């Protein structure tokens, strides 16, 4: 049963509820669900739920109808995010776990780990104990293999996954391995599941060769009932009458599991097909079906592998798979999880940099001289700007640690929000807003040296630039207006061409950067032309002291008055709303997310309490960031 408690329940009454349930032999889990304090109680003696509802401080009791209780969405409606060292699995992320079927030598595991790290894998898998069909097949290196795997993981900064085949190995594995893998053959070894669950460590649970989806979730229940909340499910194919592939990869199980359970699920196309040529398409299909990531076998030389060589990818094939996943992720609105770069700057920051701090690298979209670069110099004391071609490149560089921070435009006073960047903020849950910069935008008509306005026939700029200079351009109806990916990039293109009939609309800095001539300055339609930029940092990289502004996003429930109820929470808590804007939810026609900027009161606890109420009233909620606004409270 799920026991929903009063928000203001006293510690005494909460202890009394727990004691009552414990007396009736219930296993108890306490958590916050949609902003409500709840107690999950499973097992135990039969009880009339009214006995629990009558206890002081209890609001409601909801029976759990599924045979699996803790793993079901009835128990927890939001997706579980599992933290493993520097990464989180679940919650809109795509995690790629890769490595050889078996650890064979130090040279082999270090070689493949280096290649995987460079290509984008976030965790290293490898077997030290191998349950093989034939007793004469390679059984793994045992404890030395675990030690080699641990050494490689520590050297490359990668969490490690490895299989446990017997309870006797648990003490040693628990000290060395970040995620314990329970293989398909042990999925219903319930005594082993009890012992593994009791360790409280993250567990990867593979679906058995002939297991139903309910069987898989019941095995997850064993793990959760005995102590761990961090269970990652894995679809790795089931046995059918088909012989062309090793197993039949049941991709239909993925959306079913996502509907029934809050636990994340990975897909293993290596075991699911047993054929190297099938791994890449089935991995992409699994991601498209809704998996939270993939588990794939990669070997530096599959032809000499001592285990599962025919289904292991070559490192080059894995590199291509990662690039394909990165192209697919934006379509699905998901973030491809990345590790911080080992050779990156690695400047952990407790606050935003100041004049006394050391130089920081800051990514921006565009070429040198762009308005975004100007914003960087106005905000950071000692920046080292790093250009990227696309807005998404800024998120990727922040996420993998190539740079310390990123800066992106989100709103213009004349043309409104830059919706693509708001959508990217939703796609990358591990990147947060940590600062705000508003700058005056002055547009210049820029051309090669020796040009004149009379010679111009073609003007290049970002669509925002063309729109913000519409009145000036209207005075030259014969000019061809050419949208370009970036304002400073348009200047660079005109400079490369050297054509005196071409010009670009950009800032004065871009003209200086490329040695060009400014033919006209201040050509924007409205002098009150400002662009708001945000500074971005990876989760945990920067904590902002005394924030004055917060940005959130939520979706409303599909019921009358749902948006009003959320906004009423803000009003009741005296939170000043600075912006409200709706955006379509990708892949869900006629459904919308609402972006809100709020003043943060001096007493932070008031804001935190209000956000708990927003979570309870909304269908979904995310805090995009808290920062000091340059617009005051």
Image (spheres, rainbow, N blue to C red):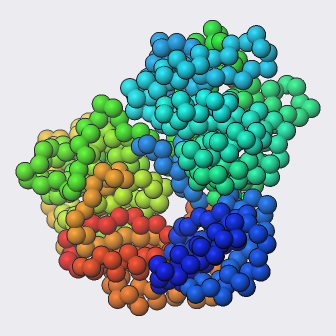
In the image, is 270 to the left or to the right of 428? Answer: right
The location of residue 294, given as percent across then percent down, is 61, 38
Residue in view at x 63 percent, y 76 percent: 20
Residue in view at x 46 percent, y 26 percent: 150
In the image, is 124 to the left or to the right of 61? Answer: left
- Vertical relation: 120 (above or below) 22: above
Q: Quadrant of the C terminus?
A: bottom left
The location of residue 459, given as percent across then percent down, is 30, 53
Residue occupying the far left of the picture: 356
Q: In which quarter of the image is residue 279?
A: top right
- Vertical relation: 500 (above or below) 271: below
Residue 506 in view in this figure: no
Residue in view at x 70 percent, y 70 percent: 24
Residue occupying the far front of the picture: 23
Residue 133 in view in this figure: yes
In the image, is 500 to the left or to the right of 52? Answer: left
Residue in view at x 68 percent, y 66 percent: 26
Q: Looking at the image, which is closer to me, 219 or 589?
A: 219
The location of residue 383, given as percent across then percent down, is 16, 47
Q: Looking at the image, which is closer to me, 328 or 628?
A: 628
The location of residue 81, given as percent across then percent down, is 53, 54
Q: In which quarter of the image is the N terminus?
A: bottom right
Q: Looking at the image, which is closer to me, 550 or 194?
A: 194
- Vertical relation: 513 (above or below) 630: above
């Amino acid at each position: 049963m799920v026991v929903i408690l009063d928000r203001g329940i006293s510690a005494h009454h909460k202890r009394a509820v727990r004691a009552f349930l414990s007396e009736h032999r219930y296993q108890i889990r306490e958590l916050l669900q949609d902003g409500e304090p709840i107690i999950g109680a499973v097992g135990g003696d039969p009880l009339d739920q009214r006995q629990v509802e009558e206890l002081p401080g209890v609001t409601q009791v909801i029976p759990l109808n599924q045979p699996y209780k803790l793993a079901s969405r009835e128990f927890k409606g939001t997706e579980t995010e599992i933290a493993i060292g520097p990464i989180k699995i679940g919650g809109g992320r795509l995690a790629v776990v890769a490595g050889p079927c078996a650890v064979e030598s130090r040279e082999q595991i270090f070689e493949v780990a280096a290649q995987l790290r460079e290509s984008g894998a976030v965790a290293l898998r490898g077997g030290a104990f191998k349950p093989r069909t034939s007793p004469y097949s390679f059984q793994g290196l045992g404890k030395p293999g675990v030690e080699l795997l641990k050494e490689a993981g520590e050297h490359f900064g990668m969490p490690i996954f490895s299989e446990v085949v017997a309870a006797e190995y648990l003490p040693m594995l628990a000290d060395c391995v970040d995620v314990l893998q329970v293989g398909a053959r042990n999925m219903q070894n319930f005594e082993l599941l009890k012992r593994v669950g009791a360790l409280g460590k993250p567990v990867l649970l593979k679906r058995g060769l002939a297991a139903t989806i309910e069987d898989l979730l019941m095995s997850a229940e064993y793990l959760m009932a005995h102590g761990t909340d961090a269970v990652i499910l894995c679809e790795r194919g089931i046995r059918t009458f088909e012989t062309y592939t090793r197993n039949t990869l049941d991709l239909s199980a993925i959306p079913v599991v996502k509907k029934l359970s809050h636990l994340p699920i990975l897909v293993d196309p290596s075991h699911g097909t047993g054929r190297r040529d099938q791994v890449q398409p089935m991995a992409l299909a699994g991601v498209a079906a809704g998996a939270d990531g993939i588990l794939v076998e990669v070997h530096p030389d599959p032809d000499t592998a001592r285990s599962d060589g025919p289904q292991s990818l070559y490192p080059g094939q894995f590199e291509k798979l990662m690039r394909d996943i990165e192209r697919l992720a934006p379509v699905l609105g998901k973030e491809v999880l990345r590790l911080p770069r080992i050779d990156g700057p690695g400047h952990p920051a407790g606050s935003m940099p100041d004049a006394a701090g050391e130089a920081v690298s800051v990514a921006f979209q565009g070429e040198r001289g762009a308005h975004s670069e100007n914003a960087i110099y106005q905000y950071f004391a000692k920046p080292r700007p790093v250009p990227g071609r696309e807005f998404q490149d800024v998120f990727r560089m922040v996420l993998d640690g190539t740079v310390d921070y990123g800066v992106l435009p989100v709103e213009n006073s004349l043309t409104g929000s830059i919706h693509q960047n708001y959508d990217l903020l939703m796609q990358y849950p591990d990147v947060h807003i940590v600062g705000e910069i508003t700058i005056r935008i002055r547009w210049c008509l820029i051309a090669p040296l020796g040009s004149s306005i009379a010679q111009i026939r073609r003007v290049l700029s970002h669509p925002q630039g063309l729109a913000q200079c519409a009145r000036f351009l209207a005075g030259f109806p014969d000019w061809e207006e050419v949208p370009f990916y970036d304002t400073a990039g348009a200047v660079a293109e005109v400079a490369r061409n050297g054509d005196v009939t071409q010009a670009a609309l950009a800032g004065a800095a871009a003209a200086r950067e490329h040695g060009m001539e400014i033919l006209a300055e201040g050509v924007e339609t409205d002098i009150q032309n400002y662009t708001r930029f945000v500074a971005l940092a990876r989760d945990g990289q920067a904590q902002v002291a005394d924030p004055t502004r917060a940005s959130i996003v939520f979706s409303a429930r599909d019921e009358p008055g749902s948006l009003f109820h959320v906004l009423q929470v803000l009003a009741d808590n005296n939170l000043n709303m600075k912006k409200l804007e709706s955006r379509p939810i990708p892949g869900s026609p006629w459904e919308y997310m609402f972006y809100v900027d709020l003043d943060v009161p001096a007493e932070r606890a008031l804001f935190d309490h209000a956000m708990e109420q927003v979570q309870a009233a909304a269908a979904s909620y995310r805090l995009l960031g808290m920062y000091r606004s340059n617009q005051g409270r």
